[in-house]
Image (cartoon, helix red, strand yellow):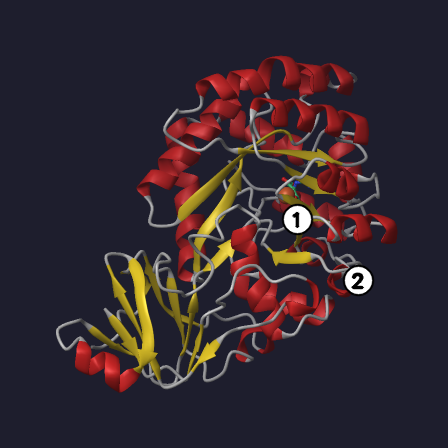
Amino acid sequence: MLIHSAAQILTLAGGPQRGSDLGELGIFQDSAILIHGGRIVELGPVEELRAAYPDEEHIDATNCVVMPGFVDPHTHLIWAGDRAEEFELRLKGKTYLEILAAGGGILSTVRATRAATPDSLLTDTRPRLNSMLRHGTTTAEAKTGYGLEIDSELRMLQALITLDEEGPLELAITFLGAHAIAPEFKDNPQGYTDHICEEMLPEVHAWWPADRQLPFVDVFCETGAFNLDQSRQILIKARHLGFPLKIHADEFDNLGGAALAAELQAVSADHLVATSSDDIRVLAASDTVAIALPNTPFGLAEKHYTPATAILEAGGILALATDLNPGTAWCENMQFVIALACRYMKLTPAQAIAAATINAAAAINRADRIGSLEPGKQADVLILEIPHYQHLGYRFGTNLVKTVIKKGEVVAGVSPQS
Ligand code: NIG
Ligand code: FE
């Protein structure tokens, strides 16, 4: 397949982008991309490549922007039920943490997810995956965390493996048994922490298929969930078993999760709304990717967003994700995340695009394979119906993706004319 004549090809070449380097799009014009065997083979002048490969399927991308598929590095995409009633409660003044403390919130989705059959979990989740794909996400991270006891958590892990194998969207799976205090341990958070460390993590490790890389282990380090010591205990145990680490840090309160992530060399620290300046410095000096989730404050109608400018000034690696979940952010669309990040985190469209592609790939340890258009990389490619990359961010609320190509095959949108 040869994609040619795009107004701009954004390659994002050169690896993850730190601090003030964020926003290097590596733009090619008057160029074409040759894709073969699901990989990018060559980028070069249109006429040269057309002449050299006359038998390839030719895709005309005139007036369009071509770029890598979005990588969404933080989602809770598998759950049962919904929380529309809670949305109304919040509009009337109840806070997210108050609803959780009263046994609602995450715990209400836990009740629905525990009661769901494996089949209905898959049936409920597939439309969300399709929506992600249509909006240009070609790889996503996906967490468990609505089971909170071993059998339900393993059911979620199995469902995620099944969905990843079905494709075409690829999933990077995370075990989030530490998403909330399980109802069985209601007044005993330390008991549940010990149970995760002594029972659940070893069971997940033993159960996990040997031919797959181990999943990430994540913890919700927050008031009303796991405190800093409990988060540390869980992450250290996980690291000891060989799991790569993630953490939900400082979504509402500054408990110190961001510095903990840096100390334990977590792959990412996510949310980072209430993070202190000291912790921003520590995190930004590390290789841990800072994932901002602007859908979440937007979804909760809150004023404070991740301080992206401070993270970048301190030299951090910043990525963007949807946080897709039934409580705070039922939104599958990375284009909308970019639009929010430009307005409320003051990123330029170029910075937001890099944060949603190559840096997002780094946030799930896959920057060697996806996130940019470079020879040898997987051909996960978007064709957007826009004349200039700035339209991403500038425009919002409609889908700008015309065609989605995954591993060299058109999988969503309009199949372009040859
Ligand atoms: O990242 N904060 C914890 N987890 C999710 C919300 C999940 C839910 O409310 O169901 C988040 O925002
Ligand atoms: Fe989350």
The residue indicated by pointer 2 is 310
**Tag of residue 287:** 1
Q: Closer to us: mark 2 or mark 1?
A: 1
Left or right, residue 325 beside residue 236: left
**Residue 380 placement (x, y as % from top left):** 37, 60
Residue at image position (44%, 24%) is 208
Crowding near pointer 2: few (<14 within 10 Å), some, many (20+)? some
- Please identify the residue farthest to the left as the structure is shown: 55
Query: At numbered mark 1, what does the secondary structure look like: helix, strand or loop?
Result: loop
Q: Is residue 378 visible?
A: yes
Describe the element under mark 2 as helix, strand or loop.
helix
Residue in view at x 46 percent, y 29 percent: 157
Quarter of image, res 213: top left
Q: Amino acid at mark 2?
A: Ala
Residue 293 sits above or below residue 258 on the image: below
Instruction: Inspect this view and state whether residue 151 appears.
Output: no
Residue at screen point 30% across, 79% down = 4
Q: Is mark 2 within 8 Å of ligand 1?
A: no
Q: Earlier in the sequence, mark 2 or mark 1?
A: 1
Image quadrant containing the C terminus: bottom left
